[in-house]
Image (cartoon, rainbow, N blue to C red):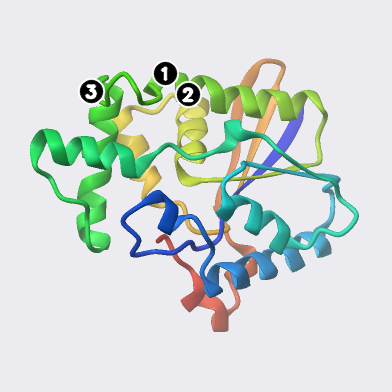
Amino acid sequence: MTTLTLIRHGQANSGATTEADYDRLSPLGRQQAHWLGEHLRATGGFDRIVSGTLRRQRETAAGLNLAGRPHSEDSRLNELDYFALSQVLHDRDGIPFPKGPAEFAAHVPQVLQLWREGHAGPDHETYDAFRTRVFGALTAAAQDGPGAVLVTSTGVIATLCALALGLEAEVKARMFLRIMNTSVHRFVFDGEVLHLAQFGATPHLDLPERHSARTYF
């Protein structure tokens, strides 16, 4: 069996309405990565880092400061293009981009349903292609053996959880909303079968003075 650790990137530029504006860590996001790196160095068991190629993912990987561990990039760990999907939803149904957490919670299932039903348009990555590429990234990391820390994003983690647990799309959408920044998730490959071993751990944020640093957006 091979265990892999997946981490969601730190808090990005929340409040952004475009991918370009969103794709950088906030000061809190950098602090979250620093704290998580301290925890990982104390617990050990990691020999390499693999991140997506998005800026927020690369900045989180660097912020972990796992000195001496090689860092490689795999674009298959990149997030779905939520902003582009949101624009399709707006153009088709007149639904605006959300302005706060409550609106976002209602928005995510609508975006994912539009995507899953194939209404994103021919120029956008399909839902099935996304699932295939993220599973391929995890499979490739497993083939290199245990000890990998993979820095990725919410959609990737939620999709892998859904694949491991056989979740329906509605449940996956709810899970999408409950993945905190720099949360830790562990998956186990037993042969070719994927299992979820840990979801949403935040040991580096469990101290009382850090509770306010727990963020979803």
The spot of residue 193 in percent (x, y) is 63, 18
**Residue identifier under label 3:** 119
In front: mark 3 or mark 2?
3
Measured along the vertical axis of the image, is residue 25 above or below residue 74?
Answer: below
Q: Residue at x 22, y 47 (%)?
A: 107
Frontmost residue, 68 versus 17: 17
Left or right: residue 56 compared with residue 141: left
Q: Residue at x 25, y 20 (%)?
A: 117
Query: Quick one: SS at disc 1?
Result: helix
Q: Which mark is residue 128?
A: 1
Cα–Cα span, label 2 and label 1: 5 Å
Quarter of the image holding residue 189? top right
In which quadrant of the rendered image does the C terminus lie? Answer: bottom left
Asked if labels 1 and 2 touch by Cβ distance under 8 angstroms, the answer is yes
Q: Residue furthest bottom?
A: 209
Q: Which mark is residue 131?
A: 2
Cα–Cα span, label 1 and label 3: 13 Å
Q: Residue at x 38, y 23 (%)?
A: 127
